[in-house]
Each structure stands twice: as structure tokens, then as C-alpha cells.
Image (tube, rainbow, N blue to C red):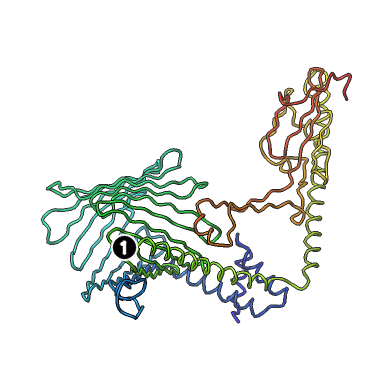
Amino acid sequence: EHGHFGVEFLRACMISNDHTLYKTLNNLHASGDITTARHVLKDAIQNDHNAKIEKDVPLFTNIELRCSTLHTKFMGEGNETSIVPELEKGTMSFSVGIPQVGGANWHADIGGSSTVKLGEGKVSGQFSAGCEAVPGTEVNVDVGVGEHPKVSIGSSRKMTNGNVASTSITKIFGMESFAWSAAMERVMFQNLIHCKFAFGLGVPDRNFHFAQLAFTSLYTRLPLIRANINLGAENYPLSVGVEKKISDGHKGKFNISLGLEGMAMKMTSTRNLSSLAKISVGLRHATSGGLSWILKIQRGRTAFSLPIRVSDVMRPAYSLKVVYLGALTALIDLAIGDLIQEAKNSVENNFLSADKEEKLVLRREQELLRKKKSKNDAMLQVSFMADRAAKCRELESENGGLVILKAKYSLLGGEEMDATTQLQFWVKKSTLELPSMPMSSLLGFFDLSQSSDTCVVEKSKYLSKEGVLEWFSWLMNDNDTEQFIIPNLFVRYSVKGFVYDITVQDGEPLSLPSLAALKLGTSGQIK
């Protein structure tokens, strides 16, 4: 169906780092499901085509329809029987990048926006261009047309230590003064926190325009935390946000903001529909805006947002409405998750082949062949190490140094190997130092790990994900953990006339002689 292009596309997938598509198609063909394989390949080619278009010609589009149901009887707000939301404000914005030629060091974008509110419309346009004047320094020019035409010129500099400094000056036509701003970004505390500081003043009147201080956590083992102080530019100058990965393709966000107008809170749950598309649902409470339900759909660089205001703060039983709509939103989110999971399960079930047992046998045979080759290579390496190990043993024995009497690298209930020669080979000046790394990566060792069908796997979750608790407990979620049987290294050695035993797990560092070793007796008593 796709001809030569399809063949070349599949060949490129085979030699890439990600073999998921190739394995998927291979499983489908093995099970005889040719129709599904065609659809999968067609979707992959289309996604790859869309990604190339977005890379060559960056296009950003955002559409927001802010609606209200305050005029309806929904949740007892109005008198109208219709539950169709009423449009309060509609906004559409876009930005298109001008394609670059070759390795050009410049970029340019053309964009605009249109807004309709209470029957009145506004249109604005913008052109921006930037050029890397010297390595690490970029100069930018922005021109805006519309209700408030403006021209801005700025530059940014990325320093050798990773800090970024930028400044700009803007002229808004119709105003006597200019607006000057400066910003500095840096990473602090050993790459744990990203910090940004910015401020703006009027020129030459030196009137205060704004000041911003923002922090973002970079520690991957904790949820992403953002804190922002923005004076003069926002209604809620203080804000803190948390973003947490709940599971693969699912994350939650919570943000709280404070200001003179009161407080605003927003919670959303985002799920991936595909590699390009995602959907978000959530709630927003604001002292000045009331309670809003949020729906957002995004595909690539195109986003559609639908916030619906359903209640004012001063309305009766506002708290009960928050609880009711929160529970409803959680159920909608779980239903979306179930639909996505069912679609995934349906595709995975198509991958199951009638000859599943035959494939399992083939996989085991391949694993045995791999381990046999690894073992043969290790034995060959040991033969090369034997002469030097023997000389080292003789020298250490004469001087009362470190002699490896016995060493065994083994897996509980599984295979084992003699490691006496290998360890003696690494002895130098009556000491042995092995780094913190798997023994199988050292000369003379081979992999003893169990095959995937015999490993011990433990799935651990803080709370069950089959219910409403998932939506409310995402902060406490942890990823799946896998535990495997780990090989041990047993060593019996002598030094200065005494014999010692020590056992370490694979991957742990080993230093001999060791204070942690068990003293058995003299060399004449213990062999």
C-alpha cells in the first residue's frame, strides 16, 4: 500500500534506537492480523509526516471559548431551562515560523490574535525576528500592531556557566515613556532549582512596572514545584504550583494563587490520548471569578480550551457545588482513563499469537545461546589471566600478602562460577579493589541473572488505582518497582597468616583486606 516509501520507513525504524513500531508490526504479522498492521503503519507514517511539518514550519494555534451557565438552571444559578453554555469571551491566537534555509542562525515568526467579548471584537498582529549576532548572544526585534501598537528590541546572552541574561526596551505608541526590562536566569544548589529574576521600569520617568521572582524544582525524584512572585503584572502576585506524574501518560497539576482580590485554585488531570494528542479536565476556583469547569484538548501544537463558569462565589451552597463538581470531574477523568486503557488492551490483545508457547520456547533458546556465548568468552578470558594470577599468588604467599583461597560467584538456586583466578589476577600490592559495578562486566565473569520468565517482580502501589482515590492521591503515587534475584560473591582469603570470609552482593564495591570480613583462624588451621 505504501510502496517503496513504506519499506524505507520501516527500515529506518529497525535501525533507530526505538524499535517499538518494528516489534509491534512483527507481532501483528506473526499472529496473522495484517489489517491491524496496515492501520498501525499508516498512523505511524502520518504521525512522522506531521512531526516533520511541525519541525520545518513551526505552527502554534490556541483557541479558547470562555463560557458561562449562570443564566441556566444548571446547579440552580439562573432561570432558563436550557443548559447550553453562553459564550462570554472567545480568543484565537496563532504563530507561524518562517522556514530557515540550511544552517541559518536566524529565526522569524508571524502571528496574531483575535478576541470577541460582549459582542465587541479586537484584532492584533505580531512579527518577531531573532539572530545570533555572536556565539551565545541573540538579538531580537518584535513589532506589534492592533489596539496598542508597539516595537521592542532586546538581546539575550547565555554565559559559560549556564546563566542567561536578557534585556529589552519597548515603545508603545501613544505613551510618552519607554518600557525597559531585564531578566536573569540561573540554576542553583547543584542543579536542583532553576531561578529567574526580572523587573521592568519606565524610561525616563523610572516608574515601576513589574518585578518577578520565580523558582522551579529540578529534582526528578520529587514532584515538579513552581513558586512565583509577580508584582505589578498580575491580579494574583503570589502563586505555587505542583505537577506530579501519576502513571505513564497521566499527570496531575495543582496551583494556588493569592492576591488583593482573594485566592484562586486550579487542579487539572491530563492524559495522553496518543503520542501527539492529550486531554485535560479540571476545576478552577477564584474569589473574583467563581467556580469554573475546564476542558482542554491538545494535538501537537494546536490547543482548544473550554472553561465554563458554573457558579459565583456569592451564590447559595457554593461549597456543596465545589464538592459536587469535583466528584463529577473525577468520575469523568476516570472514565477517560478507562477508555484509553481499554483501547490499549484491545491493541495489545491483537498482538497475542496463537503460537505463544512456541515463541516462549524460542525466547528461552535465544537466552540460553546468549548465556552460553557469554560463559565461553569468560572461560577464554580466565585462561589468559591464569599465568599472571599464579605469579601474583606465589609472590603474595612469599610476602604474607593477600592470597585468594576460594571465590565463588553464584545465584541463589541457580548457576555459579569459580572466581578465584579472576580475583587473584586483580590483586596488587596485597590489596584488591573492585568498583561498584556488576561482576558480569569484569574480565573473566559472565552474567548469572535469571531469564525474564523466572525473575521475581513486585508491583507496589501506595493506593489502588481502580477508583476515585487515584484522582485524589496522585501526590502519594510511586512508580512500579521491580525486584530481581541478585547474585552474591563469596571470597575466602588469607593475609598475614590469618584466613577471612566475606560475602557481598553483585554491584557492591569490594575492598580487601576488609574490616567487615569474618576472621576464621590461622592459615595453618583453615584452608
- At which x and y percent is residue 378? 79, 44
Q: Is residue 382 above or below residue 107?
A: above
Q: In which quarter of the image is the N terminus?
A: bottom right
Residue 357 visible to an observer of this rendering: yes
Residue 392 visible to an observer of this rendering: no
- At which x and y percent is residue 177? 13, 53
Query: For the residue marked with disc 1, what is the amino acid?
Result: Gly
Please indicate whether residue 105 sits to the left or right of residue 447 in the image. Answer: left
- At which x and y percent is residue 525? 89, 20
Query: What residue appears at the point 12 percent right and 61 percent down from the top-left corner?
Result: 174
Please indicate whether residue 407 sits to the left or right of residue 11 in the image. Answer: right
Q: Which of 475 and 176 is in front in this view?
A: 475
In the rendered image, the residue lying farthest to the front is 316
Query: What residue appears at the point 81 percent right and 55 percent down from the top-left corner?
Result: 368
Query: What residue appears at the point 70 percent right and 75 percent down from the top-left corner?
Result: 29
Q: Is mark 1 on a helix, strand or loop?
A: strand
Q: Is residue 235 above or below residue 327?
A: above
- At which x and y percent is residue 190? 46, 38
Query: What residue appears at the point 81 percent right and 56 percent down from the top-left corner?
Result: 369
Please name the residue that numbered disc 1 is placed on.
290
